[in-house]
């Protein structure tokens, strides 16, 4: 897992990997985001990266493997994550706009509390993913395996789950509007809590 080093400014936030300070106290947060992207591009496998609170635009993370990384509170606009592999990666309370996760393999990843708009996860392995409390709108999950993922207390709007494995996917208290589950095994998903 990523090493937690406190920001040298004493704010209680965690410092960005390779820097003594957090994104809030960075003199130039855009430069820090570019430095992190360059760091990722230099290696196929990225481990223990701590990059919370940064803003990434038009970044290409395709084909990289991420293990034990932290991007909490970051924003991603028009970024490519196609064919990425992720294990234990944290994107809690982040923003995703126009991002592409097509054919990715994500397991034990957390998007809790994030806004995910106009993104595609088509043809992906999305196993044990935490989408709890997200606002997900105009997204495509078609032909994906969402086994045992959670959308608890999420708001999901105008999104497609066509031909998906939704076995044990938890939609309890999720507000849904305009969703399509055609050819998916939605009967094996959890929409109401079990009462004993």
Image (tube, rainbow, N blue to C red):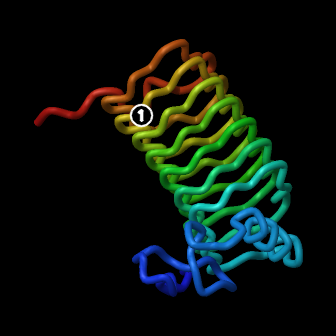
Q: Which residue is mark 1?
A: 154
Q: Nearer the viewer, residue 98 or 131?
A: 98
User: Farthest residue in the right direction?
Assistant: 42
| Circle 1: element type | loop
User: At which x and y percent is residue 190?
Assistant: 36, 32
Quadrant including the C terminus: top left
Asked if 34 appears above or below 6 in the picture, the reply is above
Q: Horizontal placement of 33 versus 108: left or right?
A: right
Asked if 101 appears above or below 140 in the picture, the reply is below
> Could you tell me which residue is drawn at 69 percent across and 69 percent down?
66
Q: Horizontal placement of 167 versus 96: left or right?
A: left
Query: Picture quarter containing residue 18?
Result: bottom right
Quadrant including the N terminus: bottom right
Asked if 68 appears above or below 173 in the picture, the reply is below
Q: Horizontal placement of 92 versus 20: left or right?
A: left
Q: Residues within 10 Å of mark 1 (few under 14, many from 20)?
A: many
> Could you tell me which residue is drawn at 72 percent across and 68 percent down?
28
């Amino acid at each position: 897992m990523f090493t937690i080093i406190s920001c040298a400014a004493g704010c209680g936030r965690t410092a960005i990997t390779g820097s003594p300070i957090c994104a809030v106290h960075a003199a130039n947060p855009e430069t820090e985001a570019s430095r992190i992207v360059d760091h990722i591009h230099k290696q196929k496998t990225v481990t223990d990266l701590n990059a919370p609170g940064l803003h990434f635009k038009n970044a290409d993370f395709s084909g990289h493997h991420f293990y034990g990384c932290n991007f909490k509170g970051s924003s991603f606009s028009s970024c490519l994550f196609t064919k990425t592999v992720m294990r234990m990666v944290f994107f809690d309370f982040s923003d995703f706009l126009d991002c592409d996760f097509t054919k990715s393999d994500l397991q034990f990843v957390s998007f809790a509390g994030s806004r995910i708009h106009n993104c595609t996860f088509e043809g992906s392995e999305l196993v044990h993913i935490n989408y709890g409390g997200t606002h997900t709108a105009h997204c495509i999950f078609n032909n994906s395996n969402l086994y045992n993922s959670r959308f608890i207390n999420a708001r999901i709007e105008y999104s497609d789950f066509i031909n998906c494995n939704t076995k044990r996917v938890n939609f309890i208290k999720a507000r849904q509007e305009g969703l399509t589950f055609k050819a998916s095994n939605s009967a094996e998903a959890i929409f109401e809590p079990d009462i004993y």
